Image: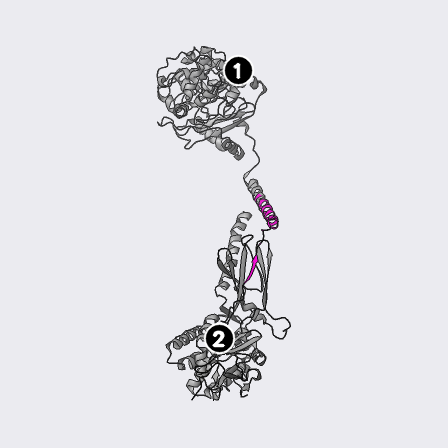
Amino acid sequence: VSQAAAMRGSPLFLCLFSVSCWVNLMPTAGDKIFHFGTCRVSVSMAEIRAGFAAIKANIQSRDPIRTLSILSHPHSLHKVKSSDRCCITHQLFTFYVDKVFKHCRTEDSFVNRKISSIANSFLSVRRKLGQCREQNNCVCGEESTEKFKQILANYEGLNVTSAAMKSLGELDILLDWMEKSHAGTPACQG
Amino acid sequence: EGLASPQHVRFTAELARHLLRWEPGHGCPSNASYDVELKVYGSTIPWIAIPECTNTSELSCDLTHYTLNPEGRYLAQVKAVCENFTSSWQRTSTFSPQEAGLFLAGQSLSVVGNSIQVRLQLLLPGNITLEYSDFQKEMARYHVYVRRTQDNHTFTLVKKSAEFTISRLFEVTEYCLSVEPTMANRPVPSTRSDEQCVTTGHRDRSAEILPGILSSCIILLLLGLLGALLAHIYIRKPVRTPSVLVRQGQCHATLWGQGKGAGSGSAGRGRQDGSFSSFSPSQKSFMKQSSLWVEHEPPSSGSLDADPIQQLFLCQKEPWLDSSPDSSTSTAQPPLEQGWKLPAWPKDQLCLLEPTGSRDSSGTSTDSGICLHIPSSSSSSSSSSSSLSCSEGPKPQGYRQQLPTAEDSGVGLENPCPAPGCSSGSGNASPGEPGLPPATSQEDVEFRGYLQQSKGTVGPEQPLDKGLSLSGCAGSVQGLGSTDTVLDMESSELAVSKGYLKQSSPEHLLTQHLAPWAAPAWDFSSRPQAPTLLSWAAPGAPLTSKASPDLKTPFDLNIFDNTAFLGTLPLVSSLSSSWITPPINPLSQLSGDSKDSRL
């Protein structure tokens, strides 16, 4: 009887283990799972980066102002506390969805398509982050709130189209910061 | 007029090698010079002119030292100067060192057996200030292009570390490798390294043996454990036979209940069933294991009610039993493939299931009521047993014991008893079995085995269902003559069959052609020729199956006995002629021991 129980148990255990591993394997190397505390968000980084790389030169050429940056120094994102990352990430994604993508219409349909795909990815990430925030998994500290205010101020210092284009051109700053701050791949990730 | 600015200005950066490349604009002769400037994005610091790339005629500029900040974001611009004309600045998009692709300083290959070990050198030696971050190393993917020289077959592998092994290659074959480093998380410019060729060696079989041996040992160990566990579960200690089931001596009664079993089984049979069930698992397993018994095809006609229960009693061999059978019989015992094989009684006596002491045990459970006694065994028991067999009228299945007591049914034919139902020591319990040639009465009577009788009263002088008239113990088997009619069945093996027909001597069987079944005009007394045996052997197989049904046909006992041979035809054929010649005390033997299960 004990043997029978063991026989039943071991395949079940193997199944559970493989399923858990498979769940982690679902995102490919290009898809990363970002852990914000207890909040897990999957972002298709490779896809977003590929889309951005295709339009980067075009978008950035439309930005004449090179002495000003919206996302980067001195309003660096690199000094964000780990506990505030969830909050500021959610705020930034909301910022991009609400204020950037819709103002980046160009005459080039190829560019527009790429922008749309990036916008869709951002939408899903923002939704997931919103759910985390509702569950009180995302806490906004004072520092992160200050940083975001600065970013908004930079944005509003320019006219809408220029600001939107500049923000879009600095998308890789956001992606790099996300990867850097969440360095460390989840288990089972290929 | 404006000079066309350089085109396609871009950064093509590898780690520690941030290159700015461009192409000459239109309309500028090849002797144009170019100026490069660099700026930090987002800062108010103005553009910086790069001295190394001022007034350069080259189309690239190395900006590594100016872009060392891994988190910096840079812009570069190039303008062309052609004679007195200057073009406008052509700017690049932003560049950060993180966009730099992986740089392979070198690769080294080494051959181990039929595999290739590859070591990639990521950094130029001496340049310690710049190295990959852990994140970059983690995200690195190396595309390895392997090409077999002989047929140009190329396949690609993706490796995650800078040191890896390519195994399972063809032996003694030349392969050429080139590696292209990429990043998993971002598209980076990558350049494929130059091909490097190497020839594989022979496979190191010794290295494969040890793991194989270890794994096989482990597997065997696990299988052994599993087998031991199963054995422990399924094998139990043998249980002693209840005394009730043992008639004489120590007999192991084995019952086979076939199929329905119940059927019209007489009470005895029912009892047998019961007794069967009362057997311990070990005994049952034993019975099952003794596959000597071959199931007889149930008679087509429903004469035979539910599958007859075959009973085999195994009794311990007794010394004096050995004397009876002659070696020939024992050796001659052919495998009863066809029909059935008697359990290999050690020439013991078959014991009745029930301890029957009287002739009136007709109601005994045992179909055959056969108790094979050793020739020298007490005739009383035998007689009783035989009487049992004889008196067992209703039992359709009687077991015809085969005369030769050698083994099989362990039927020891004792002096044949001419009286019906008198097995005179032969103990053939086959009820109503026509007395087989009483030659079996002698010790040398060998019990051939049992041919299941078709349903029908086997009792003495009780006609079989189908009219097969058995002359009972006395039977008209007198004509059967001596042991000739007794099929010498090697009783060494217990045959499992539905019923048993006592087999008369092979010769007799042979003499009687199968055809004239209905015509018992056999000259039993005469000795059948050995060759006839052979003739019978051929149709043995089908005959055996018909053995039972045949019983139903109106046959004389003689025929019955002969038909019994059918079942044992295969045996017969193999029987040596030696045992054909046992002394025949025709009538006496037949009468008494005409029962198949001559005991």
Q: Position of residue B136 (x, y in %)?
A: 56, 70
Checking the image for residue B79, the label placed there is: none
**Circle 2: residue type:** Arg
Do the numbered discs 1 and 2 sit on residues whose CB atoms are within 8 Å?
Answer: no
Q: Position of residue B374 (x, y in %)?
A: 54, 18
Q: Position of residue A178 (x, y in %)?
A: 52, 75
The image's colour scheme reads one colour
Tell me the residue that label 2 is attached to.
A133
For residue A86, side relative to residue B538 (left or right): right
Give SS at disc 2. Answer: helix
Q: Give the camera-side residue of A60 and B83.
A: B83
Q: Give the camera-side residue of B484 and B309.
A: B484
Q: Position of residue A64 (x, y in %)?
A: 46, 86
Residue B72 figure quarter: bottom right
Tell me the residue that label 1 is attached to.
B444
Q: Which residues are magenta?
A: B194-223
Give the letter of the chain under mark 1: B
Q: Give the camera-side residue of B125 and B168.
A: B125
Give SS at disc 1. Answer: loop
Q: Nearer the viewer, mark 1 or mark 2?
A: 1
Residue at point 40% right, 13% down?
Answer: B476
Other residues around mark 2 within 10 Å, as few (<14) / some (14–19) / many (≥20): some
Residue B300 figure quarter: top left
B291 in the magenta segment: no
Residue B63 figure quarter: bottom right
When the figure is inspected, residue B388 is found, relative to residue B154, above or below; the finding is above
